Image (cartoon, rainbow, N blue to C red):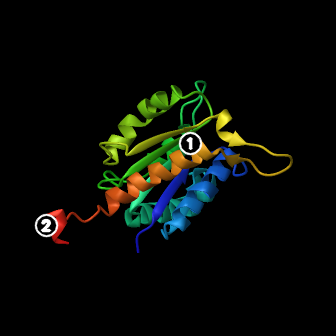
Amino acid sequence: MSYFLTLSSSPTKFSKAGFLLRSIGSVLQQRAVEFRAIQALDMPPIEPGTHRSANQFIANTVEQVQQAAAIALVTPATKESSPTLLASLLSLLPDDAFSRKPLLLFAIGGLPGQVAILERALKQILFRLGTTTIAARVHVGTGSWILVGDDHPRLSRGVESEVAYAIDLALTAINPPEVSLEPAGFR
């Protein structure tokens, strides 16, 4: 069974990245596509006391990546930091693990121009993983959220549409529409 897999590198689980994951899951549910997420934060440190559990986490991640039909990366984008949490997880994956899979990049925070900086920081790792082109890039900045009272933040309609469009691009790459060779009048 194939599914849509998200690798998230938010430094906390209860952040805007978590709410973005909910939005991604909601869009995929509307399209009847299974959704799974792996949090880089859950990876145990690779040291003697946690070596076994770290190896199991990595093995499970590799298996899920291999079975996934598409990959989405969700990571903070700020000028002060590079995506070290995401890069450390991706560096443990085997070569060509993303080969022939559409890849989406969701950058949270920062400014739109920092998405290119983030992409440049990940370029070598993504190339090693078999990614030649990123199917879509979505910047989810501070102004992309609607905050009402004590409710959880939610995406604005415009950004929600942009997220849905990026997902649809990936889904189209997985299942290209059938093209009929018959003239339109003969159907």
Going by the picture, which residue comes out furthest to the left?
182
Q: Which tag, 1 or 2, sits closer to the chain's start?
A: 1
Residue 150 is left or right of residue 146, and the answer is: right
Residue 28 is left or right of residue 145, and the answer is: left
The picture places residue 81, in percent across and down from the top left corner, at 59, 29
Going by the picture, which residue comes out furthest to the bottom?
1
Q: Secondary structure at mark 2?
A: loop
Residue underneath mark 2: 182
Q: Residue at x 45, y 31 (%)?
A: 121
Q: In the rendered image of this protein, does residue 128 appear above or below residue 54?
A: above
The picture places residue 76, in percent across and down from the top left corner, at 59, 38
Residue underneath mark 1: 75
Give the CA distance from mark 1 to mark 2: 45 Å
Q: In the rendered image, is residue 51 in sight?
A: no
Q: Secondary structure at mark 1?
A: strand
Q: Residue at x 51, y 60 (%)?
A: 55
Closer to the camera: disc 1 or disc 2? 2
Q: In the rendered image of this protein, does residue 126 appear above or below residue 1?
A: above
Image disc number at residue 96: none
Q: In the rendered image of this protein, does residue 106 appear above or below residue 102?
A: above
